[in-house]
C-alpha cells in the first residue's frame, strides 16, 4: 500500500498536468471559442472533459461527501460563466483549477455559517472519486489521497491541496486564503506532520518537513 503522503504527491501527475508547458490541449483549444459562443455541443463536450477534474478537486478540498455534488455544480457554473475571461495565459486546466477553487472557498465560507456544519464522522466513500480514463492504480492513489486529507483540519487540507495539487507558492496561497504567509507555512508544516504520523515511509519524513 502506498504511503498516504506519497499518494497525495502523485495526484498532480495523475491529474495529467504538465507543469513545464503553458499550452491548451488541441481538443480544448478547439472547443473553447465554440463554447464561449454558446454552442450547445461544444459546451457539453467541454463539461464532459472538465467534470471529473473539478469534481476530484472539490473532493480533495472538502470533507463531506454530501457536499461534493452541489459544490462541483456551483464551481462548474462559475467556470462556464467565466469562459470568455480566459485569455490563453497559462494552461486552460490551470485556469479552471483556480476559478473552481475560488468558487469552492466562497461557498465553504457560506456553509460554515450554518449552525449544523460541523466536522463529524461521515465515512469516506471511495465511489465519490471519478476519472476520465479510470485505471486501478490511479483510483487507488486518489482513494489514498482523500483518506489522507480526511485526517486533517479544513485549514490544513486546504493549504496542502493548494500546494501539492495546484502547485501554488506560499505567497500565492496567502493571497488566495487571505492570511499571512507565516500562517500558511505553519499550516503546511502541521499538515505534513499529521500525515507523517499516519503511515508515512521513513525516507519521506525529512522531505515532507521542508517548507517553501
Image: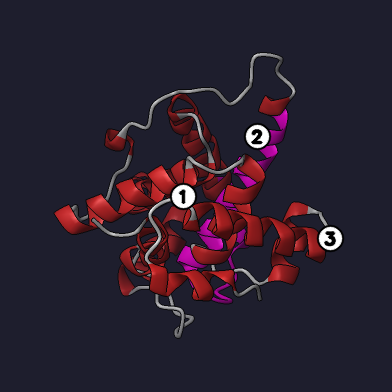
Task: Determine if residue 135 is in view.
Answer: no
Left or right: 115, with 72 as reference point: right
Question: Dots 3 and 1: beta carbons under 8 Å?
Answer: no
Q: In this view, does 85 lie above or below 126?
A: below
Q: Which color mode does the image show? A: secondary structure
Instruction: Give the residue number, with chain letter if any, for mark 2.
Output: 107
Badge 3 or badge 1: first in the primary sequence: 1
Alpha-carbon neighbours of circle 3 within 10 Å: few (<14), some, or many (≥20)? few
Question: What's the CA distance linking mark 2 and mark 1?
Answer: 14 Å
Tag shown at residue 180: 3
Q: Residues within 10 Å of mark 1 (few under 14, many from 20)?
A: many
Residue occupying the point 72% across, 64% down: 185
63 sits to left or right of 203: right
Please tell me which residue is depicted at 33% across the width and 45% down the height of the picture. 44
Point out the tag, 2 or 1, that comes first from the N-terminus: 1
Of all residues, the one furthest to the bottom in this rendering is 20
> Picture coordinates of residue 173 (x, y %)?
70, 62
Magenta-drawn segment: 81-110
State the mark number for residue 173: none
Q: Pointers 2 and 1 in contact (CB under 8 A)?
A: no
Residue name at image x 65 percent, y 34 percent? 107
Q: Looking at the figure, which quarter contains the N terminus?
A: bottom left
Q: Helix or strand or loop: what does disc 3 sit on? A: loop
User: Which labelled disc corresponds to residue 57?
Assistant: 1
x then y, percent, for residue 207: 51, 76
User: Rounded to the nearest whole Å, what is the CA distance between mark 2 and mark 3?
Assistant: 22 Å
- The residue sitting at the front extreme is 202
Name which quarter of the figure residue 59 lies in: top left
Tag 2's secondary structure?
helix
Q: In this view, does 210 lie above or below 107?
A: below
Q: Is residue 145 above or below residue 124?
A: below
Amino acid at each position: 500500500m502506498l504511503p498516504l503522503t506519497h499518494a497525495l504527491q502523485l495526484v498532480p501527475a495523475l491529474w495529467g498536468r504538465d507543469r513545464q508547458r503553458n499550452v491548451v490541449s488541441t481538443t480544448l483549444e478547439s472547443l473553447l471559442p465554440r463554447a464561449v459562443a454558446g454552442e450547445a455541443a461544444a459546451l457539453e463536450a467541454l463539461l464532459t472533459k472538465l467534470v471529473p477534474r473539478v469534481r476530484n478537486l472539490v473532493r480533495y478540498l472538502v470533507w463531506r461527501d454530501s457536499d461534493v455534488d452541489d459544490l462541483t455544480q456551483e464551481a462548474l457554473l462559475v467556470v462556464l460563466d467565466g469562459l470568455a475571461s480566459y485569455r490563453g495565459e497559462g494552461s486552460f486546466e490551470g485556469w479552471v483549477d483556480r476559478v473552481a477553487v475560488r468558487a469552492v472557498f466562497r461557498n465553504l465560507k457560506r456553509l460554515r455559517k450554518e449552525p449544523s456544519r460541523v466536522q463529524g464522522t461521515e465515512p469516506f466513500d471511495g465511489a465519490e472519486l471519478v476519472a476520465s480514463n479510470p485505471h486501478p492504480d490511479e483510483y487507488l492513489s486518489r482513494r489514498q489521497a482523500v483518506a489522507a486529507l480526511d485526517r486533517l483540519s479544513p485549514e490544513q487540507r486546504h493549504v496542502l491541496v493548494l500546494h501539492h495539487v495546484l502547485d501554488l507558492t506560499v505567497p500565492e496561497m496567502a493571497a488566495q486564503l487571505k492570511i499571512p504567509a507565516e500562517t500558511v507555512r505553519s499550516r503546511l508544516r502541521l499538515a505534513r506532520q499529521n500525515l507523517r504520523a499516519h503511515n508515512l515511509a521513513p525516507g519521506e519524513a525529512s522531505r515532507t518537513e521542508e517548507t517553501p
